[in-house]
Image (cartoon, helix red, strand yellow):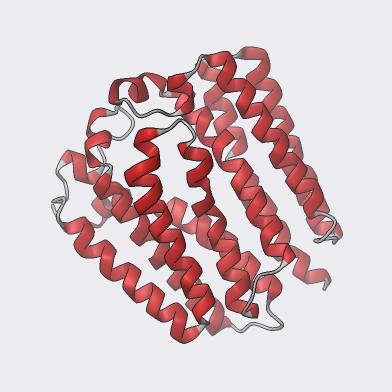
Amino acid sequence: MVWSLPNYHGLFKPRSSLLLTYTGLSAYMYSAEKTDAFSVLLFILLGILATMSANTLNNYFDRDIDASMSRTRNRPLPSGLIPSTYAPLLGIPMIVISILSFTLLFNALSALLVLFGCVYYVGFYTLYLKRRTSLNTVIGGLSGVIPPLAGWTAATGGLGVGAVLLGAIIFFWTPSHFWCLAIRFRDDYVKTRVPMLPSQTGLTESIRWIVIFNLLTAASITVSTLFFDSLIYRVSALAALALIISSSLLLYRKQDNASAWRSYKISSPILIIIFTGVLLSLLTL
């Protein structure tokens, strides 16, 4: 059924929306002089609305690719569970509402950052980078940096060192994380001619770049402990570093699809651990 709620799960991608909103919320709460339950709830709702709108339009423009890939062919648009015309009819108003609400309820700079993130992800990454260059995930990963920047700005009216450090962690984590997924589904990317790195280079070269970006992620996390200097955050950082090291060693030693999939799963909680550390460090301030 068109209006069956489970069908919209694949359209809105709520898990990624919640993760991105969580990174923004952590930065918002950490940088704010004080917060109340109402402002936190507003930020969560608007963050989810903005990220779900971008995901909805991403699904709309990627529906031809999704229809050809085993991993994505059952998503609601390529499978026909939801008419494709519904996606822009939902996504565009959601973006407009979220931008206007950020402007009125927080500040114009946070709204501008949210708008930039949505346009960059949908317009530049989805429509251009993804189909043209194996650096798509690297350059396109800039959109994932926006939530902590927008969260910090929503609280303070400007950017700060902490926001940049958190954004750097996301930026370097994103390519290595998704390249592990792309190794597992390399045949799909070859078939659809999407130039994801593992479909353009050999397995060994892809793993080399994954390890390089894992090291850059580890370096960013290490530097961030100089700013977020609470014991709670440093414990979170150590846990994240342990996952990065174990993921890299596994992939480097095995160098096969199964180890890439395990590395993908191992690296999945890293952002949750880091940004939970940011939130919990508020207990020591």
Is any part of residue 66 visible from this angle? yes
- Residue at horizontal 24%, vertical 64%? 90
In the image, residue 68 above or below residue 98: above
Dividing the picture into quadrants, the one containing residue 12 is bottom left
Q: Nearer the viewer, residue 26 or 143?
A: 143
Q: Nearer the viewer, residue 93 or 240?
A: 93
Tell whether 235 sits left or right of 141.
right
Left or right: residue 262 compared with residue 196: right
Residue placed at 71% from the left, 28% from the top?
246
Q: Nearer the viewer, residue 223 or 124?
A: 124
| Quarter that holds the C terminus | bottom right
Residue 89 pos. (x, y %): 19, 63
* Tally of numbered discs: 0
- Horizontal side of 103 relative to 149 (left or right) equals left
Q: Position of residue 87 (x, y in %)?
A: 22, 56
| Residue sitting at x 80%, y 44% | 238
Work out whether 140 lies above or below 179: below
Q: Against 258, is 80 above or below?
A: below
Task: Decide if residue 4 is in sight here.
Answer: no
Give percent across and percent down for residue 13: 37, 51
Residue 254 lies, in percent from the top left, at 62, 13
Q: Residue at x 35, y 43 (%)?
A: 128
